[in-house]
Amino acid sequence: MSPDLRRPRRWASGVLLGALLAAAAGSAAAWHARHEAAQALERAAAEAARIAGPEPLAERVQRQRAANEELRQVLARLKGGYGFRRRPEFVVPEAEPEKGKFFLNRFVEVRQRLREQAQARRIESDERLGFPPDDRVPPDSEAQALLDMLQLTDKALSVVLAAPDPVEWFEIKHGKPYETGPLSRPPLLRELPLTLRVRGSHKTILWILHRFGRTAEDDFPLIIRGLAISSRNQRARDDIAQLDATFELAALDFIPETQRQGEAGPRRPALRSRP
């Protein structure tokens, strides 16, 4: 009696057919994948040839260099016209052994000159000019920063004291310098802020405001960060309108490119928004 082999044959045939179908499917999938990869490579090569050829790339680099140079020239003009410039008498000599005392001597000279001008025009003022209430010698490390603020104070008050119609009084306060610029880039400049308050006529305040924006050839303007004007006149028929004006001023000290290689970090807002 021989065994019945029909069932094993059917099972073996099914296994063989499944293997053949799987192999065919695998071959088709592999061919399809290779075909897609080849097409993608051809597209990439064609795109690279289109945008990275020797002539177009050279032209693009040349245009970019020209644009960069034009931008540098524009920035140089802006820095030259608006950037803070130290006057020689407000610079600590490198060989000066007592830098703090150098500042104090310069401060006394400037204070005396401004005091005499104010007294000659009967203008009340804070004789300390916004600086500490004593003549203590500051640390040498702070001397140049204090001289910078003294120069700005001298510049702002020289405008006030030169007004054709004198103000009644003035006072000045100094802010702490801070770096500013685009948040995604290293700091572009330092703002040196100060606040000036005066009481005077409408004509005088407008004259002062106008003069802050004017500069000599080797000078720099004071930037108006904010302005508030109020009046204490109680009657509409008052003949003399004395106004209280608060000027938020600043000088712009642009940071040299050689010092702008660091990473971007937190800083105060740019000039377009109040700090």
Image (cartoon, helix red, strand yellow):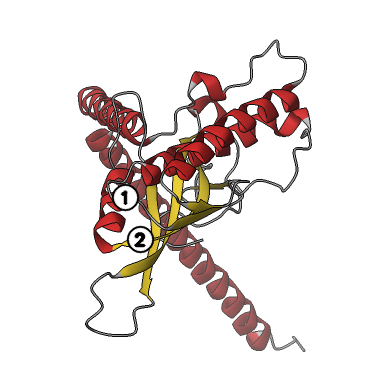
Under circle 2, the secondary element is strand
On the image, numbered disc 2 is attached to which residue? 200
For badge 2, the amino acid type reads: Gly
**179 left or right, relative to 254:** right
Q: Residues within 10 Å of mark 2 (few under 14, many from 20)?
A: many
Q: Residues within 10 Å of mark 1 (few under 14, many from 20)?
A: some
| Residue 86, visible in the rendered structure | yes
- In this rendering, the label closer to the viewer, 1 or 2: 2
Under circle 1, the secondary element is helix
Residue 260: image quadrant is top right
Spatial CA distance of label 1 from label 2 is 10 Å
**230 left or right, relative to 47:** right
The image position of residue 197, as x and y in percent, is 46, 59
| Residue 261, visible in the rendered structure | no
Q: Quadrant of the N terminus?
A: bottom right
On the image, numbered disc 1 is attached to which residue? 208
